[in-house]
Structure formats: structure tokens, C-alpha cells
Amino acid sequence: MLDKKVSELLNDQVNKEFYSAYLYLDFSIFYEDAGLDGFANWYKIQAQEERDHAMLMMQYLQNNGEKVTLEAIAKPDKVLDDKLHVLELGLEHEQYVTSLIHAIYDAAYSVRDFRTMQFLDWFVKEQGEEEKNAEDMIKKMKLFGDDAKSLYMLNSEMAARVYSAPSLVL
């Protein structure tokens, strides 16, 4: 059995990962409405990844005899008004998620729950990649986003992203 606090934090994170998926679907809709189908694709795939993160955490909890409690997913409350601003909101959200993962890791560390720490190692690495991707997208948008031809090429780059499920072994 997991420590009560660690279990509660993981369960809460399941719900936050589903919220992240919901938020990124909202971003995808924004970009689709703006005619940027490549960016819409990028965020649809991002939503799939977040859903998979939630599913991995659910499975980890269940594998450790813990009950998973799903809560209502809040409606995204971010004002999406500009293509660059949406990317900045994405980075801000990834930094928030990183802080949540670190808090769970810290709780596991404090009770010497090495198995959960090992499980979370993948998420710590993943969050580093997520923040880097978000930062790179912002840099590219700042460099190229105001030029129609460059934005078209950037949008095409985002359209080429394909989904690949995480390969984390529980």
C-alpha cells in the first residue's frame, strides 16, 4: 500500500492530467478556428499524451491496491485571444504540472517510497521535454509568426507531428 498522502497526490494528479487534456483540446479548437490546422493537430496530440499520463497514474494506483476517484473536469478558463499567447499559456501550464509532479516526488521521497519515485522519474523527464517543446514553439512563433509564409511553414511543421503512446513499464 502507498502512503496516504502520496496516494492522494497521485489521485489528484490523475484528475489534473485529464484537465490538461481538456485544456489542450481547447487550445486545439482555438487554432482550428484560426485556420492553423497544424497547431490544432499539435495540441490534439498533446491532449492524447495528457490523457495517457492520467491513465498511467490510474494504473499505478490500481496496481498498488489504491482506489481511483475521478472528479469533475473543470472547464478551461483561459482567455485564448492570440496565437502567441496560447503558446505562452501552454508553457505556463507545463511549468505548473512540473511543480505538481515535483510535489508528489517530494512526498514519496519523504516516506522513502522508492517505487513511486522510480515511477515518477519518467514523468520528471517528460516534463522537462514538455517545457522545452513549449519554449521552442514560443521562440519559433516570435521569430516567424508575423510573416505569412513563415507561419505557413511553421504550421506545416506542427501538422507533421504524430501520436506515439508512452512506453513506460509499470
Image (cartoon, rainbow, N blue to C red):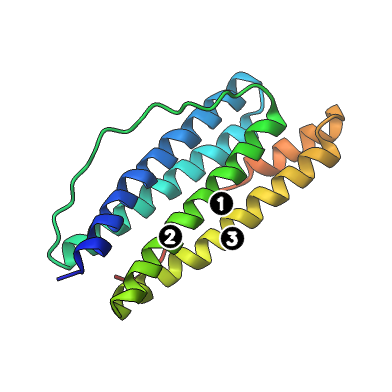
Task: Specify which label sits upstream in the sequence, 2 or 3.
Answer: 2
The amino acid type, in three-letter code, at marker 1 is: Gln
152 lies left or right of 86: right
Q: Is residue 49 visible?
A: yes
Q: Quadrant of residue 67?
A: bottom left
**Mark 1 near mark 2, Cβ–Cβ under 8 Å?**
no
Task: Specify which label sits upstream in the sequence, 1 or 2.
Answer: 1
60 lies left or right of 158: left
The amino acid type, in three-letter code, at marker 3 is: Glu
Q: Which mark is residue 95?
A: 1
Q: Quadrant of residue 170?
A: bottom left
The amino acid type, in three-letter code, at marker 2 is: Ile
The residue that mark 2 highlights is: 101
Residue most extreme to the top: 33
| Secondary structure of the residue carrying numbered label 3 | helix
The residue that mark 3 highlights is: 129
**Mark 3 near mark 1, Cβ–Cβ under 8 Å?**
no
Give residue 144's position: percent from left, percent from top. 84, 38
91 vs 36, nearest the viewer: 91
Image quarter hosting the N terminus:
bottom left
